[in-house]
Amino acid sequence: MISVEDANKIIAFLSAAYFATTDAEARKEFNRLANEVRKASGQPLE
């Protein structure tokens, strides 16, 4: 399991990448990856 603090740092990078692109498929993948990190840290999905 990953700590919530570390997960949120990774999610911040994924969020930056999400907002840096307009490609719908890329955004979908960044969101999926962020949710996987949330799951691994015990956080609710978004």
Image (tube, grey):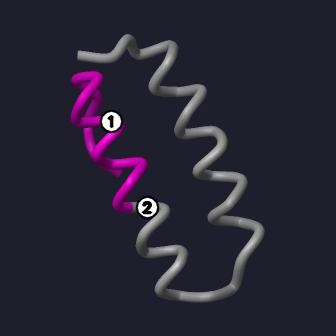
Magenta residues: mostly which secondary structure? helix
Mark 2 belongs to which amino acid?
Asn
Rendered position, 44 above or below 1 = below
Indicate yes or no whether the magenta region holds residue 44.
Answer: yes
Callout 2: SS: helix
Image location (x, y in percent) of residue 22: 69, 85
Q: Residue at x 62, y 88 (%)?
A: 23
Indicate yes or no whether the magenta region holds residue 23.
Answer: no
Image location (x, y in percent) of residue 10: 55, 34
Rendered position, 10 above or below 28 = above
Mark 2 neighbour class, 10 Å CA radius: few under 14, some 14 to 19, many 20 or more:
some
Rendered position, 43 above or below 1 = below
Mark 1 belongs to which amino acid?
Arg
Which quadrant holds residue 28? Answer: bottom left
Tell me if 4 is positioned left or right of 10 in this view: left
Q: How far apart are marks 1 and 2 (CA)?
A: 10 Å
Q: Which residue is drawn at 41% across and 16% down?
A: 4
Rendered position, 3 above or below 30 = above
Which quadrant holds residue 21? Answer: bottom right
Highlighted range, magenta: 32-46
Location of the N terminus by quadrant is top left
Residue 38 numbered mark, or none: 1
**Residue occupied by mark 2:** 31
Which quadrant holds residue 43? Answer: top left
